[in-house]
Amino acid sequence: MTATVTDTIALDAQHVLQTYRRAPVVFDTGRGCSLYTREGRRYVDLISGIGVAALGHAHAKLAQALGEQASALIHTSNLFHHPLQAELAARLASLSGLPRAFFCNSGAEAVEAALKFARRYWGAQGQPQRTGYVALTHSLHGRTMGALSVTWYEHYRAPFGPLVPGVTFVEAGDAAALRAAVTPNTAAIIVEPIQGEGGVRPLSRDFAAAISATCRATGTLLICDEVQCGLGRTGRPFYSAVLGLEPDLMALGKALGAGVPIGAALFSDRVAAAAQFGDHGSTYGGNLLACRAALIFLSELIDGGVIAHVVDAGRRMEAGLRAIAARQPAIKDVRGAGLMWGIELDRPAAGVVQAALELGLLVNRTSDTVVRLLPAYIITEREIDEALPLLERAIASAVEAPRS
Ligand SMILES: Cc1ncc(COP(=O)(O)O)c(C=O)c1O
């Protein structure tokens, strides 16, 4: 417990698989939108563990419920029933309109389940040749083999081929290309309603309409990956609904457990009807601790009014970001909704992330030139008003620094 920052970083370098380029900061505690190092330095957190700690850090109700749950029962496996999983599935059904859930432990696993059951559906319809997927350029759906196969970024894919065959990528917004890509062998189209890693790019309503029309005309299933943009992040339960999309399958993760790992794939009746006992499984999936966290999160989100707060806080954040963009010519675009924002620069965003870190502000870079903000849903007006001037200073200082 007395390891120094240097000890921790050295031990990581020695024993942790080196797949993350971490900032050299070690956090010990948090509260709300603040994170603290052992030395007591405070950082304003606008990234919330990449959109996960939606209720903020050390949320009192969540902490108490998890303590109680850990003292009662954490895990029994899916060999048996427990009271929380079905309750969570019912809650997600009423929120999404998709009546059945499969629980897993991450966003990638939720995508994986959706990809598998899209095929399972067509197999059950006597059309086992429908195994292909159409995905979008700039997509990221996760790092497992299936999810990686529908992820566009070559640097994530290339070291691990061959991937799942039969995936066609289409430029987001290109309706003609989408229609051409869907063939009699396509099982599903998979989209993020707002592309997260792709630079916080919402799909256009016209393109969403083209997706819906293509699915209707060909019977192709629609998978909406709401792992990053769903569950209230945009001030609406699901951004697919904002775009008028009606998915047959949905992937959820990130905010669902407010920090406790849990993912879920949601299914329409017609897809769920194809599932047979033994088709899919997860040892941990939907255990009591994870479900308790998700139930607390959803209760705070909907019954506790957090989603309404996201709308208000989002408006304040958007107004602040647009004002900064008007003053900072290096900003080319500000995109997003609710508390999911991307600030596109005319240069790589890494310098801003670094400058922000030095100022005590946590933001992150995505799609090379985009600064991404995914703060906790409970961020206060005061915290927004504290964070945005720091962000502007970080942008200004990165712009003044010579380009690398
Ligand atoms: C849209 C989307 N889908 C899936 C994933 C994968 O989620 P996880 O990292 O929990 O596996 C991510 C992760 O960033 C994501 O943004």
Image (tube, rainbow, N blue to C red):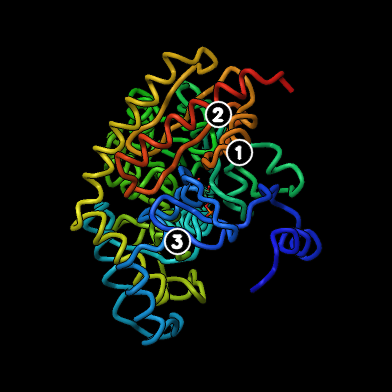
Q: Disc 2 and disc 3: Cα gap in Å? A: 28 Å
**Side (left or right) of 125 relative to 98:** right
Which quadrant holds residue 370? top right
Answer yes or no: is residue 225 visible.
yes
In front of the other: 43 or 67: 43
Residue at 52% x, 59% y is 109
Residue at 69% x, 51% y is 20
Res 259 label? 3
Quarter of the image where the C terminus is located: top right
Dot 2: element: helix
Give the residue number, with chain letter if any, for mark 1: 358
Mark 1–mark 2 contact, CB under 8 Å? yes
**Side (left or right) of 192 relative to 166:** left
Give the residue number, with chain letter if any, for mark 2: 394
Q: State whether residue 16 is above or below residue 394.
A: below
Q: State whether residue 47 is above or below residue 292.
A: above
In front of the other: 159 or 219: 159
